[in-house]
Image: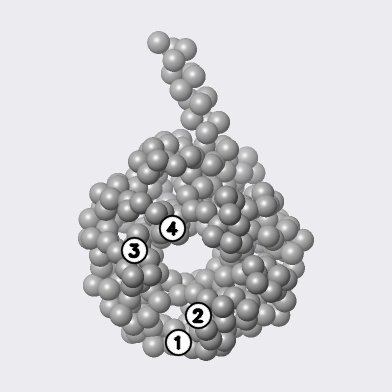
Amino acid sequence: MALPKQVKIVEVGPRDGLQNEKEFVPTATKIELIDRLSAAGFRNVEAASFVSPKWVPQMADGADVMGGIQRRAGTIYSVLTPNLRGFEGALAARADEIVIFGAASEAFSQKNINCSIAESIERFAPVAAAAKEHGLRIRGSVSCALGCPYQGEVPVASVVDVVKRFAALGCDEIDIADTIGVGTPQRTREVFQAVTEVFPREHLSGHFHDTYGQALANIYAALLEGVEIFHASVAGLGGCPYAKGATGNVATEDVLYLMHGLGIETGIDLAQVVEIGDFISNAIGRPNVSRAGKALLAKARSEANSCV
């Protein structure tokens, strides 16, 4: 299959990237991050999470963040909503899309939320119905699609089953997520070949973590299967909670560098994203783990200094 001519990059840094930061990131910093990402050309930004602040204190200011951003026409602002209360918050905050989630691993589901996969997804039925009633997009995220920290290998059939369940709820888009970053290109292709049999390829997305350094290779493998939507986190924000010291989300700068090198249109200004990665890394005091981002930033500063 020929590579896509263009792809959509979903920027997940403001939510998935920041949610595990121990020190609270100021609301103003989150707002500036989202505004700068919007200005750089992202068509979809995962902006906030409407969960109990008891469980995710970093996301307690979701309503203030959504109320403070400068919305760019044509950009989808997504929020995570685990229940009806969260949905009501998302609706009041004028979210464009809600995100619901379920694991492809029974062991992961039982360990984390003490119920089966089927039960966990069925709990989202009223949330999905409410979203449809109010005209909001729904995105379903299939976690542990390429491996589980508890059971190890996850059968492809389990991933397909979860995709079917999300499709039945009316999801407009479904993420295939390598939550712990253990996936390989061959497995990635096998999984996408299977799920495209039960859900439209153009509405499937790849969410890869770089724990074992395979994220870009897995993205390329997904491209070969015709996938046109990918998630990434600026500066590689977000760690992997199941692998101490490991990187988590693939860095947006690295993904953009790959796409541009392949001649695939993204509609995103890479130079701006490099600057945004530097901004947020400095703002929260953590290292920028994007290889392309650091290299391009060093090159830009070297060229600027040589012109003085």
Residue 298 vs 30, above or below: the answer is above
Residue 275 vs 181, above or below: the answer is above
At x 44% / y 15%, what residue is drawn?
Answer: 305
Q: Label 4 belongs to which residue?
A: 20
Q: Nearer the viewer, residue 47 or 85?
A: 85
Counting from the top left corner in percent of width and height, residue 141 is at 52, 71
At x 54% / y 41%, what residue is drawn?
Answer: 290
CA–CA distance in space, label 3 to label 2: 18 Å
Q: Label 1 belongs to which residue?
A: 123
Q: Are marks 3 and 1 in contact (CB under 8 Å)?
A: no
SS for tag 3?
Answer: helix
Tell me which corner region of the image, top left, top right, bottom left or bottom right, holds residue 278. Answer: top left
Q: Nearer the viewer, residue 108 or 101?
A: 108
Q: Residues within 10 Å of mark 3 (few under 14, many from 20)?
A: some
Ranked by sequence position, the earlier of labels 4 and 1 is 4
Q: Are marks 4 and 1 in contact (CB under 8 Å)?
A: no
CA–CA distance in space, label 1 to label 2: 12 Å
Counting from the top left corner in percent of width and height, residue 207 is at 57, 61
Ranked by sequence position, the earlier of labels 1 and 2 is 2
